[in-house]
Image (cartoon, coloured by chain):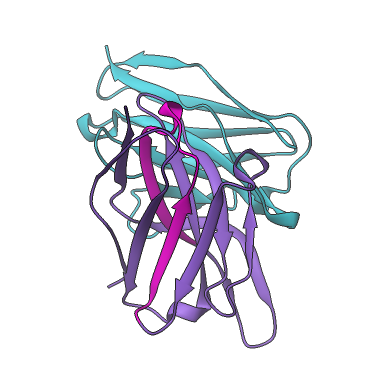
Chain colours: A cyan, B purple
Amino acid sequence: EVVLTQSPGTLSLSPGEGATLSCRASQSVSSSYIAWYQQKPGQPPRLLIYAASSRATGIPDRFRGSGSGTYFTLTISRLEPEDFAVYYCQRFGSSFQYSFGQGTKLEIK
Amino acid sequence: QVQLVQSGAEVKKPGASVRLSCKTSGYTFTTYYIHWVRQAPGQGLQWMGIINPSGGSTNYAQNFQGRVTLTSDTSTTTVYMELTSLRSDDTAVFYCARGGYCSSTSCHPADAFDFWGQGTLVTVSS
């Protein structure tokens, strides 16, 4: 089973700053099978990025996904107040294997 | 527009079962897979299982194998999740989510979850 480890656990930044969130896989993963989600309190997750670097419908271009192999990143430029939330990476693949990282909390400094 | 609307909150005693529903609309029900995801209070997301509403084939996470059953009703475009032998650590919000699809020639279950239900809180307490 592929285990996803996200870092840092918590990231404290100010609006206007940039954020880099990391997701490391325990073994190599096809970029096609990596997604990122944003979750705010009391809400379901929202798909931000699929196939490691493609933005989902309606996602602003300040969100950028990248990476390959075992290391993937979500970069958020010019943080807006509504960007402070918990972010999860996800891996899905053949044989009906789906897993999430433990999440990174992005909080206002 | 695509919508997944889940049933309301439940309170159950340990050892009981719960059956949750996920009513879908706004797309062809039999084209897309539906997943269920558990989120315990203050915790992360845990995948539980997947169903192909076209035919009803299922796959479950090992952690839930034997306790979870997913079913679908094409007449009402609704997916159901039953979880048995409830324990206190099953207290969580359960989400349904759409992810993966079938074309006329093949199926592609490995895909991101693009639409989610609002979640259903299940509280297990004696």
Which residues, given as a range, are shown in magenta? B76-98
Q: Please give left or right for residue B9 compared with residue B17 in the image.
A: left
Nearer to me, A24 or B124:
B124
Do we see residue B80 in this rendering? yes
* A13 versus A37 height, above or below: above
Residue at horizontal 35%, vertical 61%? B21
Task: Give the position of the N terminus of chain B as an image quadrant.
Answer: bottom left
Residue at horizontal 33%, vertical 55%? B117
Task: Give the position of the C terminus of chain B as an image quadrant.
Answer: top left
> Looking at the picture, how far across and down is residue A36, in whole percent?
49, 42
Residue at horizontal 32%, vertical 57%? A58
Nearer to me, B45 or A23:
B45
> Looking at the picture, how far across and down is residue B86, in whole percent?
45, 37
Q: For residue A84, which quarter of the picture?
A: top left
Do we see residue A55 in this rendering? no
* A70 versus B79 height, above or below: above
Residue sticking out furthest to the right: A27
Q: Please give left or right for residue B44 compared with residue A12 in the image.
A: right
Q: Is residue B48 magenta?
A: no
> Looking at the picture, how far across and down is residue A2, in whole percent?
72, 36
> Looking at the picture, how far across and down is residue B19, in whole percent?
38, 55
